[in-house]
Image (cartoon, rainbow, N blue to C red):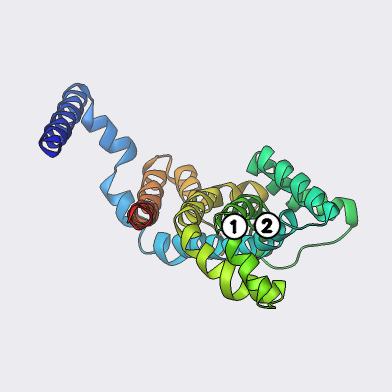
Amino acid sequence: MKAVLENKKTLINTLIVVIFFLFLISIADLDNLRETMFKPDLIQDQFPKIITQAAKNTLIFTISGFAGGSVLGLLLALMKLSSVSFYRIISSIYIDIIRGLPAILILIFIAYGIPIAFGVRIPGDYSKGILALSIVSSAYIAEVIRSGIQAIPVGQREAAEALGMNRITIYYKIILPQAFRIMIPPMTNEVVLLLKDTALISVIGVTSTTKELTRFGRDGVMSDANATPLVVAGFIYLVLTIPLTRLAGLLEKRLSNKEKN
């Protein structure tokens, strides 16, 4: 009975959404909209470069930033769980500051503040963006890892210590493998957020070969005096993010079902 009511509710909500969109379509100036934002010849002009260059660079920034953020995040999480108060304080301050600041400010500081303050140049076309994204993501990933580790019952650690295992072995063989399963759904969400944060890299400057999707779309808008390139870039973002979002939801549901059983 409950399932039937849920299905009816879903059907009614779907019909309401469909009717609403049909109403919007009926009152919209579709010809002007198509000419301004969905111009067929400009859509065709974006390919294949938007895939072979912009989407590729977006994935490079995302994967590299996530890898760097995961390594730093693991270190920060272990510091925050440490029995040494100095490590806990340093980790907590870092995490609070990075999570409290807008990502764009962190990117600007990495790109311009560090070279000005220390007189060093960050080499490589991708390096500034990857470093900035690694730092931005590390604070959030650290909290995911910390919560995953703390979700493992303390008794398992105590039993391992009673068997004579050292702390590194306990984490490597017992704690982290179990915590990893718990961390997969929120980590997937972090990848999605990081992928969207790559749009901020254009603020700190990119070369002609390192344009990500947003910068690629913006350059197209400027050159063609039409919003179509940015719309196409948005569509590519959806192609990349929706499967990951669905995967995160599926993993969360599966993990919840396992905990109930």
Residue on which disc 2 sits: 77
Q: Within 10 Å of the Cα at label 1, are there few (<14), some (14-19), or many (20+) other Cα atoms?
A: many
Q: Quadrant of the N terminus?
A: top left
Residue on which disc 1 sits: 145
Identify the mark nearer the N-term, 2 or 1.
Answer: 2
Q: Quadrant of residue 122?
A: bottom right
Residue 66 is situated, as x and y percent measured from the top left of the image, at 57, 61
Work out whether 195 lies above or below 170.
Answer: above
Provide the secondary structure element on which disc 2 rests: helix
| Residue found at x 46% / y 48% | 217
Provide the secondary structure element on which disc 1 rests: helix
> Label 1 near label 2: C-beta < 8 Å?
yes
- Please name whichever residue, 205 or 5, is drawn nearer the observer in this view of the structure: 5
| Residue found at x 38% / y 51% | 245
- Please name whichever residue, 155 or 87, is drawn nearer the observer in this view of the structure: 155
Residue 212 shows in the view: yes
Q: Which mark is residue 116?
A: none
Q: Amino acid at mark 2?
A: Ala
Work out whether 162 lies above or below 142.
Answer: below
